[in-house]
Amino acid sequence: MASNGMAATFAAVFIALWVAHQVADHWIQTQYQADRKGHPGWSGRIACAAHVTSYTATAAVAVVALAVALDLHLSPWRVVAGLTVSAVTHYIADRRTPLKRLAVLLGADRFYALGVPRPGRDDNPSLGTGAYALDQSFHYAWLFVAALIIA
């Protein structure tokens, strides 16, 4: 059974990763990366890798700041392992096609397409799409796993 200290460490690490996720995905990511990370070929892969690099650096800063501020003794290997899980799964989701395939496999393809502009139109420019909601929930699930690994 986990100790209260481990549970508190997990909670603190998860919050740090979640905040870093929000900052990295919405403030740190460049428009170029956001526009191209899902494109096919090397230009999309490179844009996505650049985003995931800055995303992971932001998460690392948050976890280190947390550890220093709260005098948490985190295993460097577990931190690296947790951040690696977060980075790899973030890359997979942000390449778009794997997440769309997962949505179709799970019967969520209609939800995935919710809010997408109609072909040839830009009639719903918003953050409120099903694809965005599934993307974010996928990331949060893996942040949970990363926090468990780190804690």
Image (spheres, rainbow, N blue to C red):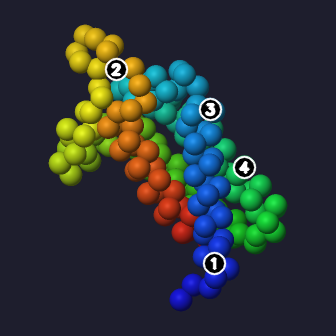
Which numbered disc flags the more N-terminal residue, 3 or 2? 3
Mark in the foreground, 3 or 4? 3
Residue at the spot of label 3:
27
- Label 4 to label 1: alpha-carbon separation: 21 Å
Of the pair 143 and 44, the residue shown nearer to us: 143
Please name whichever residue, 122 or 100, is drawn nearer the observer in this view of the structure.
122
Q: Name the residue under label 2.
A: 124
At horizontal 43% and vertical 38% (from top left) the residue drawn is 94
Name the spot of residue 134 as percent of width and height, x first. 35, 44
Q: Earlier in the sequence, mark 1 or mark 2?
A: 1
Q: Where is residue 6 in the image (x, y as percent from the top left)?
A: 63, 78
> Which kind of residue does numbered mark 1 sit on?
Met
Q: Which of marks 3 and 4 is nearer the N terminus?
A: 3
Q: Disc 4, disc 1: CB below 8 Å?
A: no
Badge 3 amino acid:
Trp
> Residue 61: which disc?
4
How far apart marks 1 and 3 lie (CA) works out to: 31 Å
Question: Which amino acid, by three-letter code, is at mark 4?
Answer: Val
> For the residues marked 2 and 4, what is the alpha-carbon distance in whole angstroms?
35 Å
Q: Is residue 126 above or below residue 3?
A: above
